[in-house]
């Protein structure tokens, strides 16, 4: 049984968004973009009737949103001209 073309594109888009998320240095932004990718994976999983994909990515999206709210802004940028302490 062949999947609809749109379903495949949602899966590829989810993959691309997740990969791009690692380009962000700000932890909050990274987690919000990863949450978006997880939501796309949920849509993909629902379209494929793949409940393990749905459940796993609901958990990932929830944790990404939760942890993004727990992350404090990087205060070191204001004091050192934008350089991180590890660079």
Image (cartoon, grey):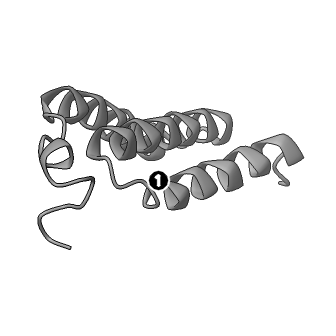
Q: The C terminus appears in which quarter of the rendering?
A: bottom left
Quadrant of residue 56 in the image? top left
Q: Position of residue 1 (x, y in %)?
A: 83, 54
Is 16 left, or right, of 56 in this rendering?
A: right
Q: Position of residue 77 (x, y in %)?
A: 21, 48
Residue that numbered label 1 is attached to:
21
Is 22 left, or right, of 66 in this rendering?
A: right
Please tell me how many numbered marks the rendered image carries: 1
Quadrant of residue 57 in the image? top left
Q: Residues within 10 Å of mark 1 (few under 14, many from 20)?
A: some
Residue at 76% over, 43% down = 7
Q: Nearer the viewer, residue 50 or 79?
A: 79
Q: Position of residue 33 (x, y in %)?
A: 46, 41
Relative to 42, say whether 83 is above or below.
below
Q: Position of residue 38 (x, y in %)?
A: 46, 41
Secondary element type, mark 1: helix
Q: Nearer the viewer, residue 16 or 76?
A: 76
Is 82 left, or right, of 75 in this rendering?
A: right
Residue at 20% over, 26% down = 69
């Amino acid at each position: 049984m062949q999947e609809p073309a749109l379903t495949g594109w949602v899966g590829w888009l989810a993959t691309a968004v997740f990969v791009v998320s690692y380009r962000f240095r700000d932890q909050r932004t990274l987690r919000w973009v990863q949450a978006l990718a997880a939501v796309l994976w949920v849509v993909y999983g629902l379209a494929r009737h793949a409940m393990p994909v749905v459940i796993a990515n609901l958990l990932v999206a929830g944790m990404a949103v939760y942890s993004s709210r727990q992350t404090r802004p990087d205060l070191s940028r204001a004091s050192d001209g934008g350089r991180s302490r590890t660079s």
